[in-house]
Image (cartoon, grey):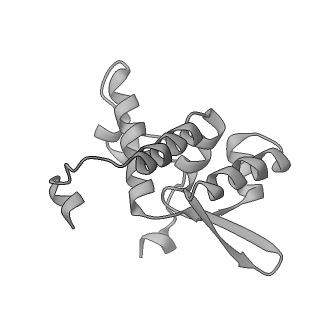
């Protein structure tokens, strides 16, 4: 894919630019950024996300609906429960790069350059997941 080779330097069409602006608009919210960061490595339910972002479920559901309309997240239904995950690897990379770039703006060694033992993990691995 040309994007992987960093040779994608064509002129952007106006509709593409407008879509990009909408994506960045969706990212310009602390709750939505926190939701996306929580979803980078796994899928989660609304209740799990509400606990992580420390907001009521209905509020988180509204944010998720916006992220879904912008095609930043997708859903999977299991019985009555709905699980959310990042739409694709490009969204995952966008969120990860934004977080890592922000970490470089702070003092000291950015957390993503430290060992896992030095960083409080959002999703600590258990032995079953590591196997």
**Relative to 41, residue 98 above or below:** above
Instruction: Tell me where residue 50 appears, x and y as whole percent.
Output: 75, 48
Asked if residue 122 lies left or right of residue 16, the reply is right
Rendering coords of residue 13 (x, y %): 36, 49
Relative to 84, is 116 on the left or the right?
Answer: left
Residue sitting at x 56%, y 59%: 71
Furthest-bottom residue in this view: 79
Question: In the rendering, at what x and y percent does residue 7 appear?
Answer: 14, 54
Q: Residue at x 72, y 77 (%)?
A: 77
Quarter occupied by the C terminus = bottom left
Q: Residue at 69% x, 42% y: name it.
A: 53
Of all residues, the one furthest to the front in this rendering is 14
Against 13, is 74 above or below? below
Identify which residue is drawn at 64% across, 64% down: 84
The number of numbered badges drawn on the structure is 0
Q: Position of residue 118 (x, y in %)?
A: 39, 38
Out of 116 and 65, give the one closest to the viewer: 65
Q: Is residue 34 left or right of residue 113?
A: right
Q: Is residue 63 above or below residue 127?
A: above
Depth check: 126 or 99 in front? Answer: 99
Look at the image and tell me in which quarter the N terminus lies: bottom left
Res 105 → quadrant? top left
């Amino acid at each position: 894919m040309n994007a992987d080779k960093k040779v994608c330097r064509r002129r952007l069409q106006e509709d593409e630019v407008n879509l990009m602006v909408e994506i960045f608009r969706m990212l310009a919210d602390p709750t939505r950024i926190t939701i996306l960061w929580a979803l980078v490595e796994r899928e989660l339910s609304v209740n799990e996300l509400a606990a992580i972002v420390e907001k009521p479920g209905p509020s988180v559901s509204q944010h998720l609906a916006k992220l879904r309309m912008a095609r930043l997240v997708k859903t999977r239904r299991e019985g009555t429960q709905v699980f959310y995950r990042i739409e694709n690897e490009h969204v995952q990379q966008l969120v990860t790069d934004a977080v890592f770039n922000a970490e470089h703006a702070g003092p000291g060694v950015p957390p993503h350059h430290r060992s896992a033992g030095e960083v409080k993990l959002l999703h600590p691995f258990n032995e079953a997941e590591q196997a």
